[in-house]
Amino acid sequence: MRALLTKYKLVIRFILTFVLVYSVLSFAYKFYLDFSDGSKYYPDYMTHLVGKQTEAVLNTLNYTTNIVPHPDEPSLMVFMEQKYLARIIEGCNSLSVIILFISFVVAFSDTFKRTFLFILAGSVLIYCVNLLRIILLTIGLYKYPWRSELMHEVIFPLAIYGMVFLLWMFWVNQFSKPKRVEDD
């Protein structure tokens, strides 16, 4: 058993670090959601921010857009040209994807500075791509409603998770220091 633990020490360390960071960040995020004040920023601050930014960009693009609190559930209703198109829920704010991204990068960490800067840059990129995803999905739902399932279930998740995967590969290949494993 000791030989296996020694042989797979780096793999075990990666898995344990990933699980620990993911668990801590997920718990903190759940705590944030449970105690966020929905009276000022409904349903929570980050989802509200994504909704307001989506509304601002779409209005700038000359699509009359209104994003309003959903009366029956913790989400935001998206109206474009006075037509109800979609809702923005907590899962649309990209924080869950960013937590997954951070957990992987920390598990393959390098120096604190490089790791921190990559996490910061990657998180901002994920947030911006997610915002673009919501904007394009809203326009797509308005212009091509018969393609809603393909856009929402396949194309846009593939884009956001594909980008996260590429960031991970870039991190592993360019920035994280490979640890040398001694042969027994």
Image: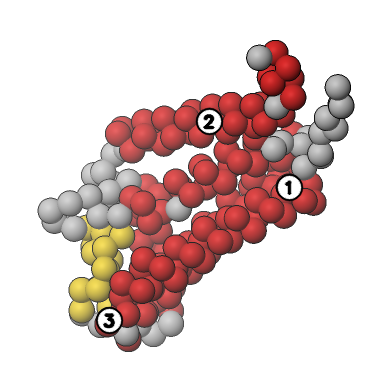
In depth, the one of 125 and 41 nearer the eye is: 125
In depth, the one of 92 and 32 nearer the eye is: 92
173 above or below 22?
A: below
The residue sitting at 68% across, 19% down in the picture is 5
Label 2: which secondary element: helix
Q: Nearer the viewer, mark 2 or mark 3?
A: 2
> Are circles 1 and 2 on residues that touch, CB within 8 Å?
no
Q: Position of residue 10 (x, y in %)?
A: 72, 29
Q: What amino acid is labelled 2 in the image?
A: Val
Q: Which residue is mark 1?
A: 172
Q: What amino acid is labelled 3 in the image?
A: Pro
Way the structure is coloured: secondary structure
Mark with earlier residue (1, 2): 2
Residue furthest top in the image: 2
Q: What amino acid is labelled 1 in the image?
A: Val
Q: Left of 158 or right of it: where is 51?
A: left
> Are circles 2 and 3 on residues that touch, CB within 8 Å?
no
Q: Which residue is mark 3?
A: 145
Q: Position of residue 13 (x, y in %)?
A: 66, 26
Mark with earlier residue (1, 3): 3
Q: Position of residue 82 (x, y in %)?
A: 20, 79
Say few, some or many: other residues with alpha carbon within 10 Å of mark 1 (under 14 / 14 to 19 / 20 or more). some
140 above or below 30?
A: below
The residue sitting at 81% across, 39% down in the picture is 178
Mark number displayed over residue 19? 2
